[in-house]
Image: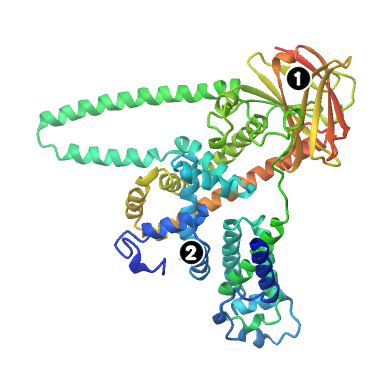
Amino acid sequence: MLDLQVKLVSELAAELLPDAAFPESAFVTNCSSFRKSGATSPEPLSVLLACLDADVGKAWAQYELIRRRLVKFFECNRCWPAEDYADEALDRIAKRSDVQQIRDIASFAVGVARNLRFEDHKRTRRIEYLDGSPAGAEALADPHDYQCDIVEQIDEEVRLQCLKKCLGEMPADERDLVLDYYSAEGSKHYKHRRALAQRQGLKMDALRVRMNRSREKLERCVDQCLAARRNRLRSASGSSAPQP
Amino acid sequence: MLIYDGSHCEGYGKEGSLFPMSREARIRQYLLGTLSEDERQRVEDRYFSEPVILEELAAVENDLIDAYVRRELSPAEAKQFESNYLSSPERRARIEFARCLERARPEFAPQQRQSESAARKFGFTFISMRSPALQWAAVAAAMLVTASGIWLIVQKGSVRTDFPVAHSQQQAPPTTGIHAGEPQTQASTAAAQPAAGSNDLPKGRDIASVSREPVLTFTPNSEAVRSVAGSGNRLTIPSKISSVLFRVPITGATYPTYQADLQTVDRQTIQTSKGLKSRNSHGQQVVYFRVPSSRLTPGDYVVRLSGEDAAGRLEEIQAFSFRALGK
């Protein structure tokens, strides 16, 4: 009974007060750059970009930064795929009639993200999970089926090959730095990285940002390598032409 | 409570301590999902308003993933981590990346920088020696070290030369063995490291021992489906292979579960694998099932794959034949 009441109250709150999570300070000024443009019915995305910055390049950079935060938010709140939710949040902001009144779009975005998360969790609560699934011969496959584990390990071998290829393509200095940065184990990594930053003549936070970027770049490279391999496999299984 | 107020953070503002531990710990708790809702919101507000916090979050997350892969997390943390990170393909991919980074590191270790540094130190020490006897001793030692180094390099070179041979005996690269009109096979001795999530394996199941078995994956050629036995799919099973992992791409409708029947050409059932689930592999749905190689004596076989609907009805969706060859 209590659960039902809580649920009703929270659902009502979401439906009646969709902007309840937004800080009031988020609404203050206008987007002067947009007004200067004189457009009458621009695309929502253009309006949003104009609100972020008058300079298109800077506006896109800000857009990407907000999107990155949103992706992280949805990942940490178990809303999958996080990138789709991030795009949905940005779409919702862009389509708001009062988007020009939003002073700080990043702060506003976290409110939109919370509403989306709430909606998602409300939906997933309706999914029922059966604890009493049949056993014996009728049992569903074991989620830790060793066949799957073997397959995953084969996938890991492919990923490792891709990573080695990507590391091989990296400039040696950058590769050495990345591998050194991520080499220290456990509690040693703080001292190790401080020493590394000193050797590089960088501050710790600058080194951290640089290593984040390098790791992201490597992860992207591996993803691209895996995608290219998938395409090759698809074309190999789809055609009868001899493979090199 | 201002959780990120610098004045409350240990070491904040000191030289070289721009990454205060208390803040790192808080972000770590956020990533593990152990903060209260109120605290979560504070963390989120901060990384939405300050780019530097987002960078810290990314850095702490990388370290957390690495710690998991290295098994440095406490059992409770590992459990929290798994409940947060194993539920999405994107995050699992990041764990796989970290695992591969661990494995790749020795091959790309920055040895050059270390050796340069050692050489600099050695040179400085040598120059500072004023006694000729000591200098000669140092020269002799240097020659000995150089000779040892050359010997080691030669030895290492021979190991490197030998490695691909040893590697191919146990584990051919997954892209090899793909020929038009032939099924795809790949041999693999699965990696020695247990898979992610093995911390909560059911009792009595030792994935490490299972995964060290030499396994041959076999993808039948789609054009050979329903062909005369042995005309298209030929499966050569090396003697050291303990089992064959069949990889059957699914075309058309998918089912909650599948059943694979391995039969001889005269319809004698060798093995029935029930409750199989399709998996997304390289962008296509695939059903895997494993057959011990001892059951695949040389001869012709048929595999019948049936989809099982929610009501438990079976419908045959694919059949293919193959010829097993011993080696």
Give A64 or B259, whichever is nearer the viewer. Answer: B259
Give B134 or A78, whichever is nearer the viewer. Answer: A78
**Image quadrant occupied by the C terminus of chain B:** top right
What residue is drawn where x is 77% and y is 29%? Answer: B274
**Residue at disc 2, secondary structure:** helix
Q: CA distance from mark 1 to mark 2?
A: 58 Å
Q: Callout 2: few (<14), some (14-19), or many (20+) C-alpha neighbours within 10 Å?
A: some
Q: Chain of mark 1?
A: B
What residue is drawn where x is 48% and y is 60%? Answer: B55
Q: How many marks?
A: 2
Please provide percent x and percent y for residue A62: 57, 70
**Residue at disc 1, secondary structure:** strand
Q: Which residue is mark 2?
A: B39
Please provide percent x and percent y for residue B287: 76, 34
What residue is drawn where x is 57% and y is 47%? Answer: B83
Give B183 or A244, whichever is nearer the viewer. Answer: B183
Left or right: residue A197 compared with residue B132: right
Q: Which residue is mark 1?
A: B235
The amino acid pointed to by label 1 is Leu
The amino acid pointed to by label 2 is Glu
**Image quadrant occupied by the N terminus of chain B:** bottom left
Q: Furthest-left residue in view?
A: B131
* Residue A213 in sight from this viewpoint: no
Give A90 or B170, whichever is nearer the viewer. Answer: A90
